[in-house]
Amino acid sequence: MHEPVSGRLWPAALILAGALVLLSGGCAELDRNAHAEALAAPAGLKREPVATGPFVLTAFVRITRADQPLTVYIEGDGLAWVSRREPSADPTPRTAIGLALAAADPAANVVYLARPCQFTPMEWNPACGVPYWTGKRLAPEVITSMNEAVSHFVAQVPGQRIHLAGYSGGGAVAILIAARRHDVASIRTVAGNLDSEFVNQLHHVSPMPESGNPFNFARQVATIPQMHYSGADDKVVPPEVARRFVLAADSRCVHTRTVPGMTHNSDWGQLWPALLATMPGCTADQEKGSREAR
């Protein structure tokens, strides 16, 4: 396992150059970035590029108290495919539900991490290519890059614990990062793909032999308090996925809730403040399945 190193902020001139690239990149790309800015700005989240390993990642950051914990939100797989057989040329999400969750969190220290190749000009990322948002989206080098970014922001709140939260495939990344760290206080996922092999089989799509499967790390992270939220009407990552993960963890610290009326792409950000009120914990009455969110 590689030791994490701090990310490096890119100079202002390069940030400006990247902005010009975004502006010249076409309406679709501009719209996705404009949507992200519209979500982030009212919450005081400011865009920062962070150089990590082979990837420059895009973050939106609000750190105001060095003496408070840090919550890190991880985006889903984004626009990975434009059809069942055709991958996208740019995985930047259209709606950025992970960013909506971060924007709804009133905590003093919040960081949102986009996945590799999302929101970041491809010119900054020579390593980017279709495999990194399809079959290799959970590859070891991807998790190493994301973990390095987490370490970069953790260094700004020295000695504090961190909370990880992930939407969809970002939930998978959260588990795989937690398996590498010793400072994670809790994990929350929303519509989290916690068993990528099972989900791929469910949808009759190709396996991902070059990617890690969070399901295989359920026991390794089982002592970390966790809450995994599923939408009752989610056909993409149905509640059974979280239930399987909870059973595999076999821990009083790992729980799941099924939220009525929610699909995979529902407005989870609107519900998030209420869901945040429940802090993951280790309880005597271990949950072996899902229960309705109140």
Image (cartoon, rainbow, N blue to C red):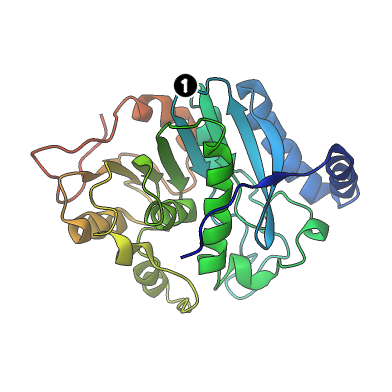
Residue drawn at x 48%, y 71% is 211
- Quadrant where the C terminus lies? top left
Based on the displayed image, in which of its 4 quarters is residue 246 positioned?
bottom left
Q: Position of residue 160 (x, y in %)?
A: 43, 31
Is residue 139 shown to the viewer in this render?
A: no
Taking 225 as reference, is 235 above or below it?
A: below
Residue tagged by mark 1?
67
Q: Position of residue 25 (x, y in %)?
A: 86, 52
Residue drawn at x 45%, y 78% is 207
- Nearer to us in this view, 117 or 181: 181
How many numbered circles does the render carry? Answer: 1
- Nearer to us in this view, 266 or 212: 212
Q: Left or right? Give the position of 179 relative to 251.
A: right
Residue drawn at x 42%, y 25% is 273
Taking 94 as reference, is 108 above or below it?
A: above
Q: Position of residue 269 (x, y in %)?
A: 49, 33
Q: Secondary structure at mark 1?
A: loop
Going by the numbered disc 1, the residue's amino acid type is Asp
How many residues crowd mark 1 within 10 Å: few (<14), some (14–19), many (20+)?
A: few
Q: Left or right? Give the position of 202 relative to 4.
A: left
